[in-house]
Image (spheres, rainbow, N blue to C red):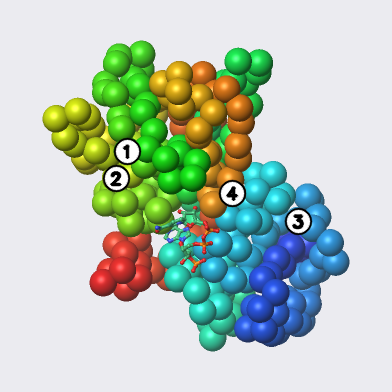
Amino acid sequence: MDNSTYKNKKINVIYNNDKESSNTSNLLKQKLTDRGYEVTKEYDNEAILNICVGGDGSFLTAVHQYSFPEIPFVGINTGHLGFFQEISPTNLDEFLDKLDSKDYIVDSLYLVEALVCTRNSCINLIGVNEIVVKGIESRVIHLNISIDNTYLERFSGDGVIVSTPMGSTAYNFSAGGSIVYTTLDVLQLTPLSPINSKVYRSLTTSSIVPSDMEIQIAPEYRDENSLLITVDGNQHRYENITHIIFKLSNMTINLLNIGKKDFWSNVRDKFL
Ligand code: NAP
């Protein structure tokens, strides 16, 4: 089978500004053109594939910048951690052969959604890796946490991370959370420096929450104006936050899996 089996041959190539990413994307664009694909000049919503050249960070930026497109992503890793960037710049031809022959599967990745409610309105946020609730200016915050409307704990500490399975290997992992296989439809609630003393008592380990349950977080009155919400590394500030409801989003994003490496070998190779 050749690439004529694709109805359209448009491909978006999205890349970092560093030298290696820019060199790799120039080479890639040439190879794609030689194989009869059309490399778009600007991001095109009709393209069949988004190829992201850089690291996981550039993939995250692209997903947000293009508003969680249905077009599948695949990543070429140019010298970053690249946990989800499957392809090495030295294996472009092998990747393009697989693309031509459609020798891949498309994985759907779960996203986390937060409804942030203030005294005036509610705002919806969506994260690929995680949504973090922290105190501004390194303040300790006090949060009343419920799961599926059952009160769980009064958390005191730096904050909490609510991560997707994909994000489980990112900030969540550094904070002592568990690695979760990407196809499991769960969220993970991970404490950041929980305080445990005679005054405060907080869970010290992360909790895995199934997809049909919501996580509700309500700051104590004195912390309503002290919260910083970070979505995949991007900070948001709102005044008078009364509560935040987290759930697994109905939306997903698609990632091309060319089967180069299985998830657990990737964990071993990137972290050990
Ligand atoms: P960034 O520099 O873009 O990312 C920080 C590191 O996290 C990079 O090495 C990045 O890989 C890696 N990374 C991102 N997503 C990953 C994933 N799903 N699995 C494994 N590693 C992943 O930092 P940023 O712009 O502030 O925020 C982006 C992400 O960084 C956030 O979503 C958060 O998960 C993570 N972060 C981690 C910490 C921490 O570990 N203490 C603190 C803040 C944020 P590449 O090198 O391939 O880009």
Instruction: Identify the residue shown where x is 32% and y is 73%.
Output: 269
User: Marks 1 and 2: in contact by CB < 8 Å?
Assistant: yes
Q: Which residue is mark 4?
A: 234
Instruction: Identify the residue shown where x is 59% and y is 71%.
Output: 54
Q: Residues within 10 Å of mark 4 (few under 14, many from 20)?
A: few
Q: Is residue 200 left or right of residue 254?
A: left
Kindly tell me whether mark 2's CB lies below 8 Å from ligand 1: no
Kind of element beneath mark 1: strand
Return the disc, 3 or 2, that comes first in the chain's sequence: 3
Instruction: Identify the residue shown where x is 68% and y is 70%.
Output: 15
Q: Position of residue 258 (x, y in %)?
A: 49, 65
Distance of label 3 from label 4 (alpha carbons): 27 Å
Kind of element beneath mark 4: strand
Q: Which residue is mark 1?
A: 157
Q: Which residue is mark 2?
A: 193
Distance of label 2 from label 1 (alpha carbons): 5 Å
